[in-house]
Amino acid sequence: MRTARDLALATLLRGGLATRDLSEIARDLPLTPEDRALSRELVAGVERRRGTLDAVIAAYVPRPRLPRDLRTLLRLGFYQLLFLERVPAHAAVDETVGLARMRRGVRQAGFVNAVLRGALRDLEGGSPTAEPGDPRRVLDVGPRRFRFGRDVFPDPSTDALEHLAAIHSHPRVLVERWIARFGEEGARSILEADNRVPPVTVRVNRMRTTREGLLGDLRALGFESMAGVHPLAVRVEPGARGLLDSEPFRAGRFTVQDETAMEAVSLLDLHPGARVLDLCAAPGGKATQIAETLEDGGEVLACDVSEDRLARLRENAERLGLRSIRPILRCRDRREPPAEGLDRVLVDAPCSNTGVLARRPEARWRFSPANLRAVTRLQGECLRVGLRALRPGGRLVYSTCALEPEENGDLVRQVVGSVRGVEVLEERFRPPTTDQDGGYAAALTRLSRTPVAPGSPGA
């Protein structure tokens, strides 16, 4: 493995959470920061634009089925041709052909070369002034507009859903759901937001600096940054190469966290000396925000089912200088709360991630009704555990980074309707925008000491 493109290909072929796998694969490779940044961009970009890339491949490859590694090579090549303006077309083709030669041999390298160069000869435009033309042959990439010499995308007059799914690179099931809930324009806004390169948002550690102080530190190091909407948020230029190697990060003056996540902790309405449970805590973004808000007083019980993820939480807490966090591994009966009578409980539940697809582009391809049903069963179980841990008069916040009502308001009302003495105080919902993730949060309280039944497994 020698180049950024080698690393990107290996990461994509590994599958799963590809954008996370990249860091593991790259850890011991002698790559420059620029190469690592290009690898991350290629991996995230191919995952983000996979649906569009596959539509292009289908139009230019006569074979109905391709081996997985060959399809991934073509995705890498077409992504660079269409979406990476700074990569010259000849370099995109030559580098992809070179990868194909190393992996598949001369014959398949010739096939990749023929497909990419054939499509390149067929392309027109690439400038903001290109005419719209037939929607089956047009692709807008930011300010640029490409026209293909053949039909690539479904005809919107006969199948508008499939056309939107291909152009905006989302599974049809999500497009259909979002149009039904938000209307076509609302759904289109979400689809476009999901395909943006999101800013890096960090949360200032007020125990070690101020937001103005952090902004000054970052700007002095050359990072373009500005204050976010949340009072703890600082937005940094997309990419922000070297941010996590910087002195302010090592000194614990900030941690990476989106503003929507910060709002969920703000909804807890914390008070000094509170005992707080973070039920699904690792890798610790919200748990450390809770501890900082409490000025490292009180007690934060930080639970997770993964020892590896809890290790990351401990590292983050140590870097930020926090001592009030107590990590707890929940590896036995997860329906039993680790403690009861707590002042505050945060249930930041595992979810479909449909509110954060710009940051986790691969999650869109895992979405299905079956997966949604499975995750809502787990969410209901977590919410019941959290309510059992809460004292009467305490406050619980249930949050997700999802847009689906089954995971959010519908689930909260279902659980609350089955439990006596629990009331919903407030709900917040935000679809993703050009500079902020989407998500949901609800604040609940227990009005009495009525026991909360654990429910059947998965209920």
Image (spheres, rainbow, N blue to C red):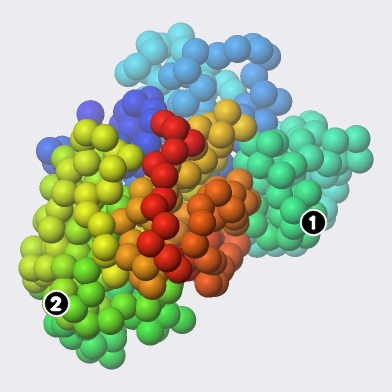
Q: Residue 179's spot in the image, x, y percent?
A: 76, 50
Q: Residue 415's spot in the image, x, y percent?
A: 53, 50
Residue visible at 32% across and 65% down in the picture: 391
Q: Is residue 337 visible?
A: yes
Q: Residue furthest bottom?
A: 212
Residue 183: give its label: 1
Position of 225 relative to 417 (above/below) = below
Circles 2 and 1: CB atoms closer than 8 Å: no
Q: Which residue is mark 2?
A: 297
Q: Residue 371's spot in the image, x, y percent?
A: 53, 32
Question: Depth check: 131 or 351 in front?
Answer: 351
- Dot 2: element: loop
Question: Depth check: 104 or 47 in front?
Answer: 47
Residue visible at 91% across and 40% down in the picture: 157
Is residue 162 found left or right of 304 in the rendered image? right
Is residue 330 found left or right of 448 in the rendered image? left
Amino acid type of the residue that numbered disc 1 sits on in the rendered structure: Gly
For mark 1, does the 10 Å Cα neighbourhood hold few (<14), some (14 to 19), or many (20 or more) residues?
Answer: few
Amino acid type of the residue that numbered disc 2 sits on in the rendered structure: Gly
- Quadrant where the N terminus sits is top left
Q: Residue furthest right?
A: 157
